[in-house]
Image (cartoon, helix red, strand yellow):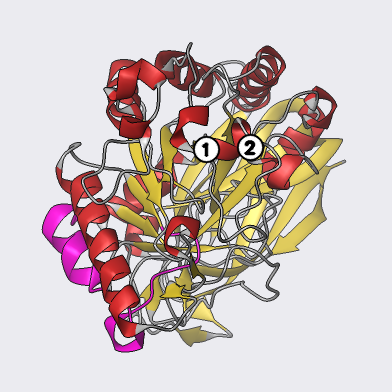
Amino acid sequence: MKNVLFSLLTMTCIITANSCVDGGQEADQSNEVLPTAAQVAWAEAEVGAMFHLDVQVFEPDYKWRETRDYQPDPSVFNPKDLDTDQWISTAKAGGANYAILVAKHCSGFSLWPTKAHDYSVKSSPWRNGEGDIVRDFIESCKKYGVKPGLYASASANAYYHVDNPGLVLSGDSAEQEIYNEVVKTQLTELWSEYGDLFEIWFDGGVLPPEKGGIDVHTLVNKYQPNTIAFQGPFGYENNIRWVGNEDGVAPYPCWSRADSTTTATGMIQIKGLNGNPDGAYWCPGEADFALRQHAFQGGWFWHEGEEDKIRSLDNLMARYVESVGRNTNLLLGVVIDDRGLIPAADSIRIVEFGKEVERKFSNSLAYGSAKGPSLSLEFSQVQPVNYVVIEEDISKGERIREYSLYGMKDGNWELVSEGSSVGNKRIEVVNGSSYSGVKMEVTKMSAEPHFEINVY
């Protein structure tokens, strides 16, 4: 939890009784589900960047689902100016605290010299087949203090004629065993040869052994037991879930607890992924979206002449409020062009985004924290309020179930909004209305709430 100090305004914190009330009854704390330390650290990271680079950047007519019997030759892959330092320094300037490299997307082409097969950088002209983009990426993350993560989907691989949910299309059991061994080999390489990973990504989830897949749960516990797993294997304690769309908009409410460690294809929008405040699992959401909107292959991959598809700064700020401000992490998809660089126009917008978030959320008008159901902040004078940022101490769980937010106008408390899910962060948009104070009252809770408020 952050501790923002302010000096220009005086503030009075009024904390009412510490009893935990739900409809007038003492709250039951026996059903509290708590995050792991890794999940708390992940939530506090808030913003990440994801980088895509694959053969279709060099051969844009390639569509892996439509040409299953054809994959571009590795000779097309030659990003001569590739510079992962440029990627990560740009992402950090944009506010990213972690970064994910798509090490293998659906074509099957691998960005590291895997021992599983020859369809990888080792068969390309890039650095004479001696390069390793995964290693470069990890080293750049270390250099700039950004936490590294890797995407390596097991659910689709055109090179082995595999599609969601991870089964060979022929249905041949021998071919499935071959593919399963490839998956096991590649995940072992990625998870054991590059150090600790902050997050691993399974686009499309994980096919369990009883349905024809490999035992990913045992593998991740062996090599990366503290990593966060997006759509990871059922039962893994550090799972997170998809919010149901690729537009960076989390549903509201969006609880960190859920009835299951939700998986989805990642290809279609799924309704109702709100989670459940009484769910059995701590499995928070991550909202992924591409910087380039309505662009080539969803905007995830670079295509020449699509700079006009880059989202506006206002659009990015809306995505921030509708993801980070709804108790999910924001994961921004960034294209890498055929030179191996983030294009200039994309870089400029990413940096602008980071500066705008800093501008809007760095100078708090008032701050307070509470252990109990009520918190009031009184200003020394009437001030225009744009945002009220509420944060729970999620190490103690999601205790706030419903709340009301008020602004003081002409000596009276005026209802500003009502909400439910808070979790790591809830951003209430106030749009410049002027108040001389702000008050939050928790009207329904599972146990004594621990929370703080910043006013901007």
Circle 2: residue type: Phe
The residue pinned by badge 1 equals 54
Residue 271 as seen in the image, left or right of residue 97: right
Residue 47 screen position, x and y as percent: 51, 38
Q: CA distance from mark 2 to mark 1?
A: 8 Å
Say which amino acid is labelled 1: Asp
Disc sitting over residue 301 in the figure = 2
> Which of the two residues, 192 or 435, is positioned nearer the viewer here?
192
Whether residue 436 is visible, yes or no, is no
Q: Can residue 315 be seen?
A: yes
Q: Secondary structure at mark 2?
A: loop
Q: Secondary structure at mark 1?
A: loop
Percent coordinates x, y for residue 440 in the rendering: 64, 54
Residue 367 horizontal side relative to residue 150, left or right: right
Residue at x 41%, y 35% (from the top left corner): 98
Q: Position of residue 103 (x, y in %)?
A: 39, 42
Q: Nearer the viewer, mark 2 or mark 1?
A: 1
Please name whichever residue, 355 or 34, is drawn nearer the observer in this view of the structure: 355
Q: Which residues are magenta?
A: 202-225
**Which quadrant of the structure image shows residue 177?**
bottom left
**In which quadrant is the C terminus drawn?**
top right
Say which quarter of the image contains residue 330: top right
Specify whether residue 420 is painted magenta.
no
Which is more N-terminal, label 1 or label 2?
Answer: 1
- Between residue 231 and residue 127, name the one nearer to us: 127
Disc 2 crowd, CA 10 A, few/some/many (<14, 14-19, 20+)? many
Residue for point 55% across, 74% down:
275
